Amino acid sequence: MPIPRRLFLGLAGAVALGAPARAADKIAAGTLGGQAPLWPFYIATHKGFFAAQNLDVEIDFAQSGAAVTQQLTAGSIEIALSVGINDPIHAIDKGAAVAIVRIVGNAAPYVLIGKKGLTTIADLKGKTVCIGSAKDMTTIYFERMAAMSGLKKGDYDVLSAGVAAARYAALKAGVVDAALVLPPLNFVAEKAGYAVIAFAPDYVKDLPFTGMAVFKPWAATHGDLVKRVLAATDASIAWLADAAHRDEAIALLVQAAHADPGDAAASYDLLRRSGYFEPTSKVSRAKLQNLITEERRAGNIGPTLTVDRLIMPGLTALAD
């Protein structure tokens, strides 16, 4: 579905929540375009959680996590609300003045889909699997999933095709036997007769998928605004997690992101079952270290990157 290039958030819902009428603080934000993974930020808009923090957030949508991170690194945006967490990690390793302040998606909701007749990951021996690129999270996730299913490198071939839509297109074209995609494409594929082989969070539970990051020079002088964005995000995720709000949340995604109603409902149930959204702004040191370990093993970062270089004291609430 088409994603609006720019969205102004923050003032809607102010009256409903009794937010103050004084001028809201403006923030230039960015994110990777999408539907279900951005649910908390649609909620923050339409349910007034940004407004309750007296924030007016202007979001610029990009077509890749790398593009969002480039904007953040250049200071073109001040905060990346949700981006593949490996992108700021790569930037920080290269010396960029950005920092991770929150985990948003706890685990990648990748769904492995494939040709009819494939039922398990082990069935992919001798087959070709479509991933994003050799250096992104699809590779890390699939290799872990394959190893847990008794497959090693060389037992299967891989083809890189970029974003999830391109990976699904490769499967439809018959170029590959299976592909890692994100909701709602798995539901679209299932309706088209393709097999659902595996759900990544059932295999990989210790690697965060998306995070919130800030431009450090701006955040150093606007720490209060960052904390208010975090508070609004926490409130939005708590609202989404309440099953009593299921129907309203689905209707909101259909309205705000032009999602298909059936796909929105299925996405809600899938993400809720997997505990996709991190409920608090506390950031696990252990999970960040797991990411560093995997990225280093894959050759994506150098030997000196540490968890302390990824975060911003006073804004990132490290746990464990």
Image: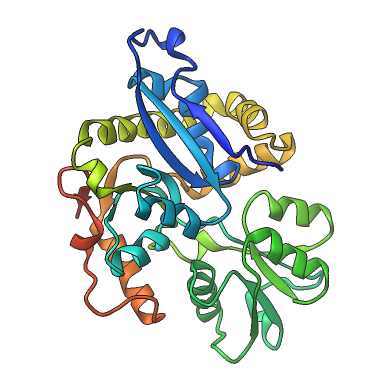
Q: Position of residue 169 (x, y in %)?
A: 76, 64
Task: Report the front residue among 266 and 25.
Answer: 25
Q: Residue 53's x, y, as percent?
A: 33, 22
Q: Quadrant of residue 281?
A: top left
Q: Examine the rendered structure and indicate whether residue 181 appears above or below residue 270.
A: below
To which quarter of the image does residue 253 belong?
Answer: top right
Residue 135, horizontal then vertical, whole percent: 48, 74
Q: Residue 84, can we see it?
A: no
Q: Is residue 225 left or right of residue 84?
A: left
Q: At 29% across and 69% down in the image, what residue appears?
A: 93
Q: Name the residue nearer the viewer: 120 or 157.
A: 157
Up/down of 304 relative to 55, above or below: below
Is residue 4 visible in the rendered image? The answer is yes
Question: What percent of the width, then of the height, locates residue 292?
Answer: 31, 70
Determine the residue positioned at 69% across, 34% down.
258
* 138 displayed left or right of 103: right
Quarter that holds the C terminus: bottom left
Residue at 39% from the left image edge and 43% from the top image edge: 77
Q: Is residue 204 left or right of residue 260?
A: left
